[in-house]
C-alpha cells in the first residue's frame, strides 16, 4: 500500500487564484481528515469525512475554503480565492475507524504570493 | 475549551541525555492521548498511544489525569530521535483529534 497520496507536493500561486489540493486515502479507511500546519498554530483540523460524508467542518477558516469527497478514494480541498495568509502545509490523513491511528500523506506546501 | 499545550517549541539535548517533551491537555471528557512524530523528509506518523501502554523506540508516556499531562520521555536520547513531536488528544464527544503546536527535538552529538 502506497499510503495516503497527496498532490501536488508544492503549489505556488498568486493571490486571488483558485487552488485545489487532492488526496487519495488508504483503501478501506472510512475516515478522511484535512489538517493545516503553520508555524504559529501548529496542526489545525479543518474538516473530516466519514464514509464520504462531511461530519465536522467547524475548522474551515471561512467560505473561501471548501472540501469534497465524491467517492471513497478521492477528496479535494479548494481555496477560492486564495490569499497570502493561506500559505501553509496542508495534510490529508485517513483512518480505519474514528479513533484509530491516523495515516498521513506527505502534505502539500502551498505558497500564495 | 479543549486544548493541547506543548510549551516548548524547541528542545535541544546532547546524545545520551534524558529527554522529556511536555504535553498538557484540557478536556472534560475521557481523554485518549497520542504522540505523533515527523522525521526530516518523512510523513507524520504515530509514535505511541496511551491505551497501548507500550514503549516505542525507547519512548514512553504516562497519562496523568490529575495533572492532565502526557509527557513523552526517553532515558537516553539518540541523534536519530531528532524530529518534530506532536501531542494529540482524541475527543470522544466530537470524534476529533486535535494536536498541540509541536516540539522540535534536536539531539546533538
Image: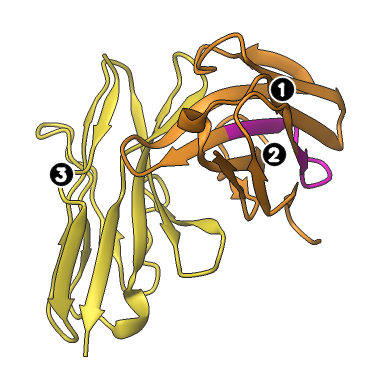
Chain colours: A orange, B yellow
Verify CB contact (< 8 Å) between mark 2 and mark 1: no
Residue B76 vertical placement versus B48 (above, below): below
Q: Which residues are magenta?
A: A22-34
Callout in the foreground (2, 3): 3
What percent of the width, then of the height, locates residue A48?
63, 24
Quadrant assignment for the C terminus of chain A:
top right
At x 51%, y 11%, the residue is A58
**Of helix, strand and loop, which one carries label 1?**
strand
Q: Residues within 10 Å of mark 2 (few under 14, many from 20)?
A: some
- Disc 2 from disc 1: Cα separation: 10 Å
Q: Chain of mark 1?
A: A
Residue at 67%, 47% (x, y): give it: A11
Q: Nearer the viewer, residue B4 or B10?
A: B10
Task: State the CA–CA distance, disc 2 to disc 3.
Answer: 31 Å
Q: Nearer the viewer, residue A35 or A12?
A: A12
**Res. A96 mark:** 2
- Disc 2: which chain? A
Residue B29 position in % (x across, y down): 32, 17
Labels 2 and 1: the sequence-earlier one: 1
Disc nearest the viewer among 2 and 1: 1
Find disc 1 in the rendering and name its residue.
Answer: A50
Mark 3: give few (<14), some (14-19) or many (20+) Cα within 10 Å: some
Percent from the top left, x then y, of residue B44?
51, 55
SS for callout 3 = loop
The picture places residue B80, in percent across and down from the top left corner, at: 37, 81
Give the residue at the far top of this rendering: A63
Residue A79 on the magenta span: no
Q: Nearer the viewer, residue A69 or A86?
A: A86
Circle 3 residue: B7
Tell me if A102 is positioned left or right of B58 in this view.
Answer: right
Residue A97 appears in which quarter of the rendering? top right
Amino acid at each position: 500500500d502506497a499510503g495516503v497520496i497527496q498532490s501536488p507536493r508544492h503549489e505556488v500561486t498568486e493571490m486571488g487564484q483558485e487552488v485545489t489540493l487532492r488526496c487519495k486515502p488508504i483503501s478501506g479507511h472510512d475516515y478522511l481528515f484535512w489538517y493545516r500546519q503553520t508555524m504559529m498554530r501548529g496542526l489545525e483540523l479543518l474538516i473530516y469525512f466519514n464514509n464520504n460524508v462531511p461530519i465536522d467542518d467547524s475548522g474551515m477558516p471561512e467560505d473561501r475554503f471548501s472540501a469534497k469527497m465524491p467517492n471513497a478514494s478521492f477528496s479535494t480541498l479548494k481555496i477560492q480565492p486564495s490569499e497570502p495568509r493561506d500559505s501553509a502545509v496542508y495534510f490529508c490523513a485517513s483512518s480505519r475507524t474514528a479513533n484509530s491511528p491516523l495515516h498521513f500523506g506527505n502534505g502539500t506546501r502551498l505558497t500564495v504570493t | 475549551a479543549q486544548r493541547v499545550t506543548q510549551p516548548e517549541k524547541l528542545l535541544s539535548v546532547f546524545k545520551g541525555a534524558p529527554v522529556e517533551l511536555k504535553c498538557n491537555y484540557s478536556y472534560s471528557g475521557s481523554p485518549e492521548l497520542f504522540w505523533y512524530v515527523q522525521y526530516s523528509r518523512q510523513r507524520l506518523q504515530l509514535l505511541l498511544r496511551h491505551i497501548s501502554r507500550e514503549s516505542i523506540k525507547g519512548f514512553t508516556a504516562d497519562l496523568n489525569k490529575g495533572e492532565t499531562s502526557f509527557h513523552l520521555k526517553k532515558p537516553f536520547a539518540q541523534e536519530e530521535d531528532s524530529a518534530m513531536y506532536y501531542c494529540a488528544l482524541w475527543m470522544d464527544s466530537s470524534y476529533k483529534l486535535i494536536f498541540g503546536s509541536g516540539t522540535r527535538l534536536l539531539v546533538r552529538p
